[in-house]
Amino acid sequence: MKKFTILITLILVSNIISAQWVQQNPNYPDTCVLKDIFFIDQLTGWANGDGYPSNPEIGNFYHTENGGLNWFSWQYYIQWLFIPMNSIYFSDQNFGCGVWDNGSIYNTSDGGSNWINNSINNQYDFTDVFFTDSLIGWTIGTKPGYMGSVNHKVFHTSDGGSNWSEQVSWGGFGTMASSVIFLNENKGWAAAGDVIKNTNDGGVTWDSQALGFICRSLNIVDENNLWIVGTVWLPQENGVIYNSEDGGTTWVQKIGDTIPFLNDIIFIDSNLGWAVGDSGTILHTFDGGETWKYQESGTTADLFSLSFIDENHGWICGDSSIILHTNNGGITGNTPTLSESDLVVKSYPNPVKNCCSIEFELIKPELVNIQFFNAMGEKVIDLENKIYPSGLNKVDWNTGSFPNGIYFCNLQIGHETITIKLIKSQ
């Protein structure tokens, strides 16, 4: 057993399978921010988002019938709104619902070729929508108030979106509504800001639970197993992943201090899950969230939404009209796994300005390979690859020529690897 000086808590890295995602960008000359993506099978899917920089007033809506090989723009169908669609949900190939800002709700019964205006016409900006079938659904929205205050509200329909009624509302400060999701027509959850609510009677009554962090997206595996990607503000703004195994009463942090914000999460069963976030971040777990690994996205664009129909076929959308697709769960090659470990070394100073020192202690001579990666997962330098003697060793990295940002130092010592997160700030 190798022993290292235990100085700080870092990230254990093991060699496992990494990512394979292919871009399926719509073939248009301009770019937009795609906010949501939804597939019902391997062929049929939709994506929606903001307008182009050259025409930001008009939203964009895309549809594919061949798994994303070709995407067709239905931009003109939502020009009436002059605002972008925030979320979509389809219960089958025909029935779908889209929600916008300003209380706007539109439904389609032909896969999106034609849309019916069922807007509530209020001041709520709707951010998520969910249906259990073509009749029963919910949406959640936020109305800005005075001096940063907001009011969140859940609305319900039982006739396919033709009519909507208010169910529950609560106040907050400076946060938009995030998620509404149901297991069946009775049991569901809604989250906004640092509050999550649940119902067992279709939304007639709701129970409330304070989270202690900001929810950005909520996903459920079953009535007990829930997942949230969110944000903590102290001591600094970081992305986090939380899990509840009792239906949302208590929450356990699984991943904290991630480099970018995380924006969406999905589990297809109790073991397999994915999360996406800013700066092209894709995380994957195969053991129920105990360990997470980075998957190579091939982009630095912020990623906002993902959709999986099974363990292999998934799609992601984000900034710059980015659409990514995998047909094998994103898996091939080698990449790091994130989990807490006592196998640690020392790095200082951190944040670093011009030079960073890495110290590690060996009980016998070992081959040590030291590499540095940026926040995108791109290798920026091979620092060392040689045999170091037993005892305390130190390696210096001159960071003066590298831009400010987040970096990872990977130290492979024998058959074990550790990763240190560094901040370059000058």
Image (cartoon, helix red, strand yellow):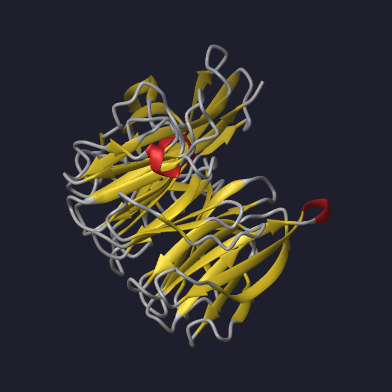
Question: What residue is shown at x 58% (from left), y 63% (from top)?
Answer: 120
Which quadrant: the C terminus? top right
Give the answer, above or below, for where 383 lies relative to 170: above
Q: Position of residue 366 (x, y in %)?
A: 32, 34
- Residue 400, x across and y down, in percent: 57, 13
Residue name at image x 25 percent, y 46 percent: 16
State the residue at coordinates (56%, 46%). 7
The x, y position of residue 289, in whole percent, is 38, 61
Say which quarter of the image contains residue 74.
top left
Residue 79 appearing in the image = yes
Say whether residue 347 is left or right of residue 274. Answer: right
Could you tell me residue 416's position as x and y percent?
A: 32, 43
Q: Is residue 268 left or right of residue 258?
A: left
Task: Give the residue displayed 33% in from the left and 71% down from the top.
Answer: 134
Which residue is more in the foreground, 61 or 146?
Answer: 61
- The residue at the far right in this view is 147
Query: Quadrant location of residue 378?
Result: top left
Task: Name above or below for residue 337 compared with residue 227.
Answer: above
Question: Is residue 275 found left or right of 395 in the rendered image?
Answer: left
Pick the front one: 353 or 124? 124
Please give left or right for residue 338 compared with residue 394 in the image. Answer: left
Please say whether residue 243 is visible from this viewpoint: no
Residue 313's place in the image compared with 70, above or below, is: below
Determine which quarter of the picture holds residue 162.
Answer: bottom left
